[in-house]
Image (cartoon, rainbow, N blue to C red):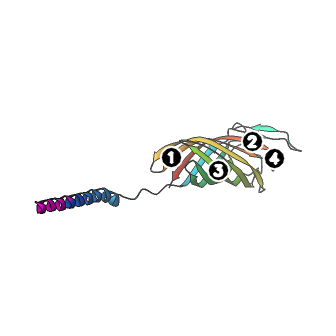
Amino acid sequence: MQRSRLASSALLALTLTLGGTAAFAQEAAPSLLQPAPPRPRNWFVHANLAVNAFTWLGETSTQPSRWITPADRFILLQQLGVGRWVHPNVRLQLTLQFVETLSGLGPNESALSLYGAIPWVVFTYGRFFVGTGVLLAARSAGKDQFDAGWFTGLGVTFPLGNGWALAAAVQAPVMFVQRLSVAVSPALIASYRF
């Protein structure tokens, strides 16, 4: 009787030990075989195309203030940039901007109106974004002269999948070194997040 109790206890202990080990192995095995989570897509590149809707130029000592619309001058803006998400809702971005005036130019005026760089911070919330930063221009008003201002943009993104997206935005730079000016331009944006 004593022997059967001892054998029963040993068999029970062995069953519990092997059963527990098998259950642990079944739980651990899938986690060992699962693929690593995808790496985060923290980087971002974009290309923008915008048309100037209107610009207000402030008064100078030689010129009165005036409004410019596409009826006066057709102004096309192009941007290329790169950014990095530093928080799920915040990205730091560096954008290069090139502005061309395609119509309404006077004699000897250059079509390349402005080029410069915009380091800016962009806040994202779902599909929406708003950003602001400094616009530093090496060329302004069609001349190789330094200008600076403040750039703001806001818009909505439409994800296409695999990191690609299209966006619609409104951009509003305010320049203040060479001549006070305010411009508003609707933009279309193609971007890729990697």
Residue 85 horizontal/vertical position (percent): 57, 53
The residue that disc 2 covers is 182
Name the side, left or right, on which 25 lies relative to 182: left
Mark 2 crowdedness (10 Å alpha carbons): few <14, some 14-19, many ≥20: some
Dot 1 and dot 2 residues touching (CB under 8 Å): no
Q: Which residues are magenta?
A: 1-12
Residue 89 horizontal/vertical position (percent): 57, 47
Nearer the camera: disc 1 or disc 3? 3
Q: Nearer the viewer, residue 105 or 41?
A: 41
**Picture mark count:** 4
- Mark 2–mark 4 distance (CA, rounded to whole Å): 10 Å
Q: Which of pointers 1 and 2 lies earlier in the amino acid sequence?
A: 1
The residue that disc 1 covers is 165
Amino acid type of the residue tagged 1 in the rendering: Ala
Q: Which of pointers 1 and 3 lies earlier in the amino acid sequence?
A: 3
Q: Nearer the viewer, residue 91 or 146?
A: 91
- Mark 1–mark 2 distance (CA, rounded to whole Å): 29 Å
